[in-house]
Amino acid sequence: MSEYTLHCFGESGNAYKVALMLELTGCDWQAVPVDFFNGQTRDEDWRSQVNQQGEVPVLEHRGKTLTQSALILEYLVEQTGKFGWQSDDERREIWRWMLFDNHKFTSYYATLRFLYGLKKTGETEVTTFFRDRAKAAYRVVDQHLSTTPYMVGGRLTIADLSLAGYVYMPEDTGMQLSDFPHIEEWKQRIKAMPGFKLPYELMPRASNL
Ligand SMILES: N[C@@H](CCC(=O)N[C@@H](CS)C(=O)NCC(=O)O)C(=O)O
């Protein structure tokens, strides 16, 4: 039995944020596959036993059950002492970017990628809307990364790992990441970290789409 248990599936970038943190910090962890595409996260039993919010990632550790990737990342900083803050100001700055990530950077892009990249809806008013919103969020992060190698403090922190959830996903979203050169360079920097793995190397895929 591993020390950490992560309920996840390969296509989930939100779960990847946590899986990558566990891997880069050398934690002893195992994945519990969630059958997302057959509705497991909507199952009442799963919700009452695993997460009432009906989402992955869910991390189990020493009798605690944690959900919400940003909060889990913060917990893992406390546990491992890695990729965290060096002052209260930095901690707030990390949270500022993780909240922006959850609300906009991940959220719009992940919805676009689910529709266009996984369900293959083709171009619709909805995908156009989400792509425009995702591009606006990517422009904000790209601009910030033109001034610094990592989001906070000039070194890799959980703010980067949160924002990195979906940027390595291979599916076509109709968005050219080459339009965001600073994000592209930042991706390469993170990829060069010892222990880095891509999402589908870290977590079992659930898709039957
Ligand atoms: N803010 C949450 C978002 C989690 C989330 O949206 N997870 C998706 C998978 S990537 C999910 O489990 N969705 C379940 C559903 O829509 O039924 C986090 O960062 O953990």
Image: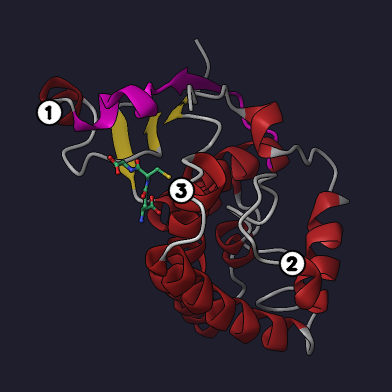
Q: Amino acid at mark 2?
A: Leu
The location of residue 36, given as percent across then percent down, is 36, 28
Q: Which mark is residue 48?
A: 1
**From this viewpoint, which residue is outermost toward the top?**
1
Mark toward the viewer: 2 or 1: 2
Q: Amino acid at mark 3?
A: Thr
**Precedes in sequence: disc 2 or disc 3:** 3
Q: Which mark is residue 177?
A: 2
**114 or 142: nearer the viewer:** 114
Residue at left offset 55%, top offset 31%: 10
Q: Is residue 54 left or right of residue 144?
A: left
Contact (CB < 8 A) between labels 1 and 3?
Answer: no
- Kindly state the secondary structure of the residue where label 2 is placed: helix
Q: Is residue 23 magenta?
A: no
153 versus 156 height, above or below = below
The location of residue 18, given as percent across then percent down, is 53, 43
The location of residue 141, given as percent across then percent down, is 63, 80
- Kindly state the secondary structure of the residue where label 3 is placed: loop
Magenta-highlighted residues: 25-42
**Precedes in sequence: disc 2 or disc 1:** 1
- Kindly state the secondary structure of the residue where label 1 is placed: helix
Residue at left offset 20%, top offset 44%: 53
Residue at left offset 13%, top offset 21%: 45
